[in-house]
Amino acid sequence: MISPHISTSLDKLPYTHTFDIVQLNLTHLFNANIPIKLLFFLSEYILIFKLFDFYQGTLNEELHVHSPECRNSCDIHSGECSYGCAVCNEAFSRKSTLITKGRIHSGDHPYSCEVCNKVFSHKITLIRHRRIHNGDHSYSCEVCNKAFSQKSALITHRRIHSGDRPYSCEVCNKAFIQKSALITHRRIHSGDRPYSCEVCNKTFSQKSHLITHRRIHSGDRRYSCEVCNKEFSHQNSLIRHRRIHSGDRPYSCAACNKGYRQESNLIKHQRLHCDDHC
């Protein structure tokens, strides 16, 4: 706590805001007629702010935050600070949040799983991921008792029972349980296909579709039939194949009740009725 005498003497200093004290030099101090005991106090005070200013400047260089509008700004009266991202100009109240945000733009993933080597930009995301390997499923559904390793997954799952679909498309009003599903759906309207195959340049709207497609080139056929051992690169192909052995024909014509193993075959069949009556 600064004594009243020191506080009164500080008022004589030639600065307008508290942080301006780092700009003072010894000439300013002596010209202000400050008592000698106070000079020792101020020298330590200035040193602390000089070190803080140096550290902050070093951190800003590491984050490539060079422009004045992207450096941190502080409200002297409220004590609130804003740290702005140099890439997207988004502002944060904590410097640590800005550092984490920077990893999204740089693609830096400093945290890796010891089991599967999957990498993450956030340490908390790695901690949640580890639960997959250690079998920790602490969050269970009160309706069906299905357990999850993350609370967010449980919250999303509950919407299946409640019917809640909080994310809706602005174009066709179709609603979704997950925000990620809405983002993927929007690509139908925009025609955006951001994932492309490195071999044949075929593009896809979903990353999972690209991963499945790559198996065609790699020859990966991880799905095999339990009856005849025939192998497939797509799980859906295996499901359709199983119907040969089971005789299941889940797709039936509404006009003649003829059944088919694949929906595409039913669509072709329905065109025959349309040609006769349309």
Image: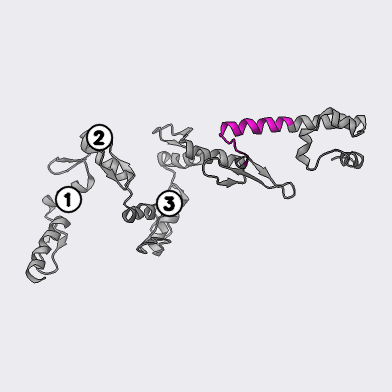
Query: Given this view, does label 1 or label 2 mark the residue nearer the observer?
Result: 2
The residue singled out by tag 1 in the image is: 240
The answer to whether 267 is drawn above or below residue 127 in the figure is below
Q: Who is closer to the viewer here, 205 or 22?
A: 22
Residue furthest out toward the left: 276
User: Label 3 belongs to which residue?
Assistant: 153
Return the x and y of residue 255 as percentages of the image width and height: 11, 69
Classify the position of the N terminus by image quarter: top right
C-alpha distance separating marks 2 and 3: 35 Å
Residue 227, how many percent across, how many down? 13, 44
Q: Residue at x 31, y 52 (%)?
A: 191
Front one among 213 and 57 = 57
Which amino acid type is shown beneath numbered disc 2? Val
Callout 2: SS: loop
Residue nearest the observer in this picture, 3 or 233: 3
Mark closer to the observer (2, 3): 2
Instruction: Give the Cα separation between the discs numbered 1 and 2.
Output: 27 Å
Label 3 or label 1, whichever comes before in sequence order: 3
Residue 58 rendering spot, x and y as whole percentages: 62, 30
Sequence-first disc among 1 and 2: 2
Majority secondary structure of magenta residues: helix
Residue 60 found in image quarter: top right
Give the number of the disc on residue 199: 2
Residues shaded magenta: 50-68
- Identify residue type, mark 3: Ala
